[in-house]
Image: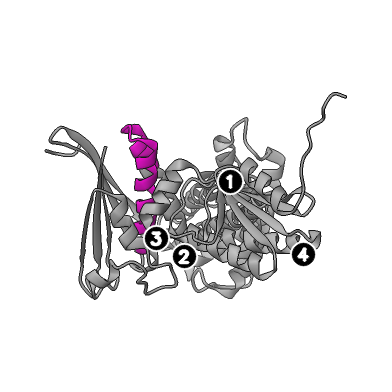
Amino acid sequence: MLAQSGLTDLLRNQTKQLHAQWMAELAAGLRADSRIGATELSEQTGEFLRILSEAAREGVWDGPQSPQLRPVLSFLDEVSRSRAIRGFTPEETATFVFSLKRPVFDHLRRRFEADPKTLADALWTATELIDSLGIHTFKAYQRTREEVINRQRTEMLELSTPVVKLWEGILALPMIGTVDSARAQTVMESLLERIIETGSTIAIIDITGVPTVDTLVAQHLLKTVAAIRLMGAECIISGIRPQIAQTIVQLGITLEGVTTRATLADALALALRRSGQTIAGTRPS
Amino acid sequence: MPPIRTDWVEVRAESDIVHARQLVRRLSSEMGFRLVDQTKLVTAASELARNTVVHGGGGRLSWECIAEEGREGIRLTFHDCGPGIADVQLALKDGWSTGKGLGMGLSGTKRLVNEFEIESRPGRGTRVTITKWK
């Protein structure tokens, strides 16, 4: 097919020229504060063209799904990954491949000037290829971003559940933010583990930093309290602010049998009393 | 009287429930609701948003800041195209649940707001409208 051979020929024999034109295209969009230097960009584009021309050498490709394009796609995966991690915008990432269009189109136009039909075919083949590579780049970018978000989510789960030892035998867990099922699970696990580790008999869950206590949050709290009891320890829930108290009552949730206190200080005082400990003030002798 | 402000948001995933809560908190605090009423409305919205995601398979929250008869309020409508509720009266009973929840969501929500309307038919989705006056 003549149209395709035009493209293969360009990729195989005029790589250098194409590279220069492509770099000129990319440099136009390269800002001074860009996250990538001209040298690195030139290396990336050069490597990309090398792999692409090798793929072209393998013979005719029958569309963007051809197996010989696989190395090209995996190279693009790498490029998108590193760009997503370095905080490139979606436009910057997509431009990498799409900016190849103009140099390729220019070349094809010059070559098939006298033959509009072949030119149209060649342009279509090139468009199809570059578009599919562009879309692939974008998908890989998106995937990496999602991975980053997921990782941050897990990191936050860990950050947000610090179990602290308040006193001998007394643990406290200040909960902050949204309590969804995943977080409730993490909280319960880390609290139960620390109870065993420290041999504590009283655990205080402080919900001052939880903005909304709905039935799901209440259910998670009740489950955690039940699990702590099963382990032979006692649980106090503190940080129940007036507006939360009123809301819980109207929702119809009964926290019967659960010891609650308005503040963490009240809960600590109660815990000390229950465990037979006292704090004595220092008196001047 | 037309609403002062109105808009809608998608409620499809767990994270949308958080967004719905934050939206309602912002609206009610901007309108000068008392803290306890803000908390009640936010909690009600949280319950309904979760129902929309868990039971309705996702839907939409339309909100209106309204003023009529010399009072101001917020009206929230949760609408999904899920399986619907076969027996609405039963669903409004305390302690009744199809899922693994406490079964207080719908009935509790009704007590947290001033007006509560539910419209549902099996296979036709569910629409719950709540209004809280300042």
Judge from the rendering whether residue B64 lies leftward or rightward of residue A16; answer left or right: left
Residue A216: x and y in percent read 46, 61
Mark before the other along the chain sequence, 1 or 4: 1
Q: Which amino acid type is marked by label 1?
A: Trp
Residue B37 highlighted magenta (yes or no)? yes
The numbered dot on residue A254 is: none
Location of mark 3 (residue):
B50
Query: Which residue has dot 4 on it?
Result: A196
Q: Secondary structure at mark 3?
A: helix
The amino acid type found where label 3 is placed reads Arg
Q: Chain of mark 2?
A: A
Three-letter code for the amino acid on which mark 2 is drawn? Ala
Residue B12 in which image quadrant: bottom left
4 vs 2, front mark: 4
For mark 1, what is the residue?
A22
Does residue A176 sit above or below A56 in this rendering? above
Q: Is residue A37 above or below residue B42?
A: above
| Residue A81 seen | no
- Report x, y in % for residue A95: 53, 47
